[in-house]
Amino acid sequence: MNNQVSAEPLNYLNHKTGLWSWLTATDHKRIGLLYLYAISTFFLTAAVLGLLMKIEKSSIGPTIMTAQTYNALFTLHGIIMIFIVVIPGLAAVFGNICLPIMIGAKDVAFPKLNLFSFYVYITGACLGLYSQFANGHSPDAGWTFYVPYSAEVNSNIILALLAAFTLGFASILTGLNFIVTIHRMRAPGMTWFRMPLFPWSLYATAWIQLLATPVVGITLLMVVAERTLHVGFFDPKLGGDPVLYQHLFWIYSHPAVYVMILPAMGVVTEIFPTFSQKPVFGYLPIVFSSLAIALVGYFVWGHHMFTSGMSYESRWFFSFITFLVAIPSAIKVFNWLSTMYGGSVDLQPPLLYAISFIFLFTIGGFTGLTLGAVATDIQVHNTDFVVAHFHYIIFGGMGFGFFAAMHYWYPKIYGRMYHIKWAKIAWGFLFTGFNVLYFPMFIMGIQGMPRRYYDYDPKFQLGQTISSVGAVIMFIGLIAMIVNLVYHVRRGAKAPANPWHGVTLEWQIPSPPPHENFDEIPVITREPYVFDNPYTKEK
Amino acid sequence: MSTPEHTEHSEHSEYIDVETGKMGMWLFLFTELFLFGGLFIVYAVMRARYGEDFHHAALELNAFIGATNTVVLLVSSMTVAMSLTAIQKSQKNLAVGLIFCTLLLAGVFMINKYFEYGHKFSLHLYPGSDVMRNLPKGEIMFFGLYFLMTGLHLFHVVVGGILLTIVMLRVKSGKINKEHFLLHENGALYWHLVDLIWIFLFPLLYLIT
């Protein structure tokens, strides 16, 4: 084959070398890794900001920063986490790395567009960072950019808005690429219902990215026009309506929550069958619940605005639809649990993360119903309860889903194995710290602690301190996890092609995969989760 | 059997499969429609709220220029579609000529738009002006929407023009030919979108009074 005598066979990591070959890579796996490194860096930055905010709140009054700094920090934390980390997150990293392999393709449909969207993403991310430091007026309007404040305040809102717009564009392009890839590039014999479930969840996600993101794009541009041209769409003095902004913003930003969570659901749906060595329970219900979440998710945006002034009928409608979304989500939870039931469960790190995903997501989901019900929402709206709910869904859901994916596909991506015990200990810290950090916020929220406040009433002292301690514990876990993963990229033990005895296509090729994945495009003859694979048996 | 399959799927192939490429373009066009959709929502809300003011403000627009521009864009859509047929029949010079016609018509559209905008500016009817501030609220909204919607559309005309210029040069150099006309087809699709959006903007802004 190759004339070089090298210790390792050629794969996508070493078939070309040098920085330039990475920066101009059109290989979907390399682009996925580029996203991974960029997103991890931003994630760590925003996590440190979160930690600083929690340290600030550990005692009453100024602790380590001023109120204005605090406002800028939660805005920056929100913008980075939502727009730069969580929304692209799983789809851009693991979607890119795994989707083509799992459907038996050599690459995505438009490899060059894929690279282009990575650079659009980087441009948006840089704009976002620049907005924080230019002229010393970091934006302080929160990640939701609510008017009239965002239209009037003298800070770098326009830059932040353009950053969000650019990042949205990158997200659209990735979604477009995935839809076409799934439609056109599936291996021969891979019918729609022989497709693994992670690609299915990416498919549902991609449609949301494609159809909802342009709406927020134009909305953000309208705020820019509001600030520069004074068109007044959202200014009551000129005949506009601030609530209209909230509608337009949430028409995108609620579906965006499903852009974050659906791929995470897809990841754990891959993990449960593998670590139970049992076919996934209820393949079709999982497929259709993904599509149902994507579809119904479009029509629930109003539940963010129960207290903003809405007619009785709309509140009733949005509340009802919000309750409907809980049904497909619950179907998935039952399916995951039933997949494990009676299986030979192997508690490896990916499964630990997947199980904690169910635990945290369920708490987040139930409290979501509290917020979806009009009466209780009015009580807890704009309190720490919302913040806690949100983090249980986004961090407990998407975040833990991301960590699960990282630990699951790590040996495939790098061909090395991380330290299993260390990974489990890190998980213990993360999971404990997470609950100690966010659970008190539910209680404080019900007691009336408002969100986004710099200072608080002395009666919240105990809760705030516990929460801050949780932040520190979680951060230790985070560092332990990252060190473990980074350290073993080069020094870990060599991983076999199929360390977890998985049956989907990515486990049937070498680790790390060769440049174009398959020497010969596989022909698919049966459903994805059949565990009588001779390859698995012989292990 | 596997050898030709192999080259067809390879990412190093210079040309993307036509069906795949077209599907990507159609999806992109959906996103464009949704982009304008946000503005259409604002239009609908404001029209419902200030029906009377919208009526008065719309009278201010010159329906003749609007109608001319509609015809111009419709004809340009036809010429770009004809150029695609021409390239499929290997009539290279005709195709180049027809794309050039399309670009010319795009130019006519922009010149008309220039005079229209110029007229509004001479009357101080632009967002943020003192005259505008004293108008009834609904009229402020109408002119705001007018400038934002037609402005965004104009931006798309410019982008479409650039895209078609690239297509024209590639047809000339022979890179786009009878076998490989995906870019040409996608450029034409994009131009039809520009046309389509105008077909909606024209009655909403000029005709409903």
Image (cartoon, helix red, strand yellow):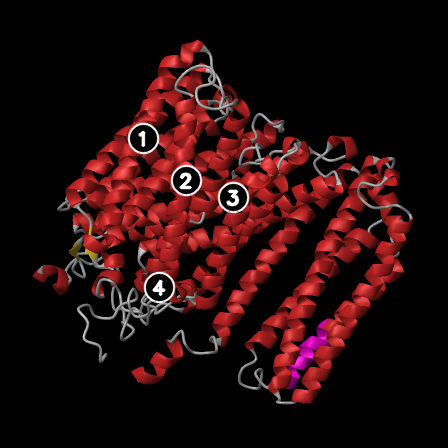
Mark 3 and mark 4 lie on one chain; the one further toward the N terminus is 4
Same chain for labels 2 and 3? Say yes or no.
Answer: yes
For mark 2, give the secondary structure. helix
| Comes first in the chain, label 1 or label 4 | 4
Residue A45 is labelled as 2
Kindly identify which residue carries mark 1.
Answer: A434
Q: Residue furthest left?
A: A538
- Amino acid type assigned to the residue bearing label 4 in the image: Pro
Judging depth in this view, the residue of A25 and A190 nearest the camera is: A25
Closer to us: mark 3 or mark 1? 3
> Which is more foreground, mark 1 or mark 4?
1
Q: Position of residue A429 (x, y in %)?
A: 24, 32
Q: Is residue A536 left or right of residue A466?
A: left
Instruction: Provide residue A190's location: percent of width, then percent of height.
Output: 32, 66
Q: Are marks 1 and 4 on the same chain?
A: yes
Toward the right, the furthest residue is: B123
For label 4, the residue is A100
Chain identity of mark 1: A
* Residue type of the residue flagged with mark 2: Thr
Callout 1 touching callout 2 (CB < 8 Å): no
* Dot 4: chain letter: A
Image: magenta residue range: B77-86
CA gap between label 3 and label 4 equals 32 Å
Q: Which residue is label 3 attached to?
A: A129
Q: Image point 25% across, 50% down: which residue? A: A408
